[in-house]
Image (cartoon, grey):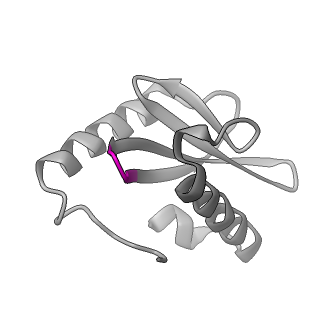
Amino acid sequence: MTWFNSQNQEVREKAIGLAKQLKEKGHELGMPAAKFLRDDIWELRVIVRRVQHRILYAFAKERVVLLTHGLTKESVVPPEEIDKTIRYTKEYLQNPKKHTHRIYR
């Protein structure tokens, strides 16, 4: 949530809009809104005023999408950021209640 809260209103609104699309379409959400990276990790592609923001996520269970963290992309998403999402997903699966935060319903 730290990354999200640090963004301006325009970026936050666009990110929430994409998250709602993801909620509705799931795996069917594709380019330009979402892109597969690797190892079951995806990115939501938030582009505002030519700045490329990314929110990394994974499908953890049948109806659970984990939005793990965001970043401002310079060229490619760094491998360590993808690894972080993999780690966060494993932590969630071990204790879902501890690692759940809802920003909207």
Residue 28 placed where, x, y %? 60, 39
Image height of 67 relative to 81, above or below: below
Is 23 situated left or right of 8 in this image? left
Q: Residue at horizontal 44%, vertical 53%? A: 67
Quadrant the N terminus occupies? bottom left
Taking the view exactly as shown, the residue that stands out farthest to the left is: 94
**Region in magenta:** 61-65
Residue 38 placed where, x, y %? 47, 22
Q: Residue at horizontal 58%, vertical 70%? A: 6
- Magenta highlight on residue 72: no
Nearest to the observer: residue 59 or residue 6? 59
Task: Residue 15: name its quadrant.
Answer: bottom right
Nearest to the observer: residue 73 or residue 26? 26
Magenta segment, prevailing SS (helix, strand or loop): strand
Task: Residue 41: name its quadrant.
Answer: top left
Image height of 86 relative to 105, above or below: above
- Report the label total: 0
Is 95 situated left or right of 105 in this image? left
Residue 11 placed where, x, y %? 71, 65
Q: Residue at horizontal 49%, vertical 77%? A: 104
Q: Residue at horizontal 56%, vertical 29%? A: 36
Is 34 situated left or right of 98 in this image? right
Taking the view exactly as shown, the residue that stands out farthest to the right is: 49
Residue 18 placed where, x, y %? 66, 57
